[in-house]
Image (spheres, grey):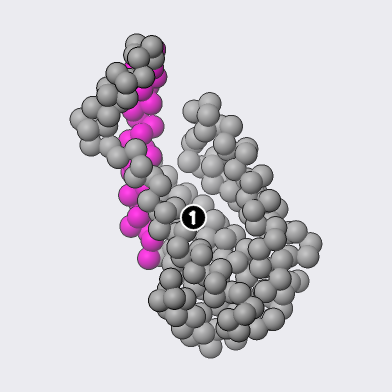
Amino acid sequence: MEFLYKIFEQILLFINGITGNFGLAIIGLTILIKIILLPLTLKQDKSMKKMKELQPILEQYKEKYGHDKNLLNQKTMELYKEKNVNPAGGCLPLLVQLPILWALFGVLRAERGIVPAESFLWMNLLQPDPYYILPVLNGVVAFIQQKLTGTDSNPQMKQMMYIFPVMMVFISYKMPAGLQVYWLTSSFVGIVQQYFIMKKGD
């Protein structure tokens, strides 16, 4: 993880040298990360579309084999194999982002002394947002992302569509504002990417 710390520190310092503000540097770093992860994002979208196409068949399987969980799982896995679908494929970008998020959290810690107690807009980057504006925005953007992915067609996912944004608010409200800026920028860029992916699909 220290290796990632060093990489992000150097990139952050480089971008800060251009922008003159660590808040803008975090935004620039976030956009760079999203561009690097774009191939994984496209793969995730493709996987989610395939899963959505299989949903009617999976519902039929539940009705037909629901009494036997083992048989249901067997038939489901056979369907995935036949259609060349990886049900975990949609989670890959998230799994990749977790160490990135953790590394960035480490970089933004006051103890490392990389990011000064610098103001960006109304907040100190090393302290939580005093007005809770960023956590609320993170929740709103998370909700929009959920809507764009079309998860409301699945009852369980529809429930998560409302629960996840609320969780985002509670998870992020104590985070350093710099990390919240990263999270918000990442989500916003994700929405833009999703819009163009959907537009291309149409």
Residue 82 in percent (x, y) is at: 20, 30
Left or right: residue 5 versus residue 182 is left
User: Disc count in the image?
Assistant: 1
Which amino acid type is shown beneath numbered disc 1?
Gly
Q: Which segment is the magenta one?
A: 36-63
State the residue at coordinates (40%, 47%). Answer: 91
Residue situated in front as seen by the camera: 49 or 172: 172
Residue 137 in percent (x, y) is at: 67, 55
State the residue at coordinates (46%, 83%). Answer: 10
Report the quarter where the N terminus lies: bottom left
The residue indicated by pointer 1 is: 190
Residue situated in front as seen by the camera: 3 or 143: 3
Residue 52 on the magenta segment: yes
The furthest residue to the bottom: 17
Left or right: residue 168 versus residue 93 is right
Residue 187 position by quadrant: bottom right
Residue 132 in percent (x, y) is at: 75, 59
Report the quarter where the C terminus lies: top left
Above or below, 192 against 163 in this view is below
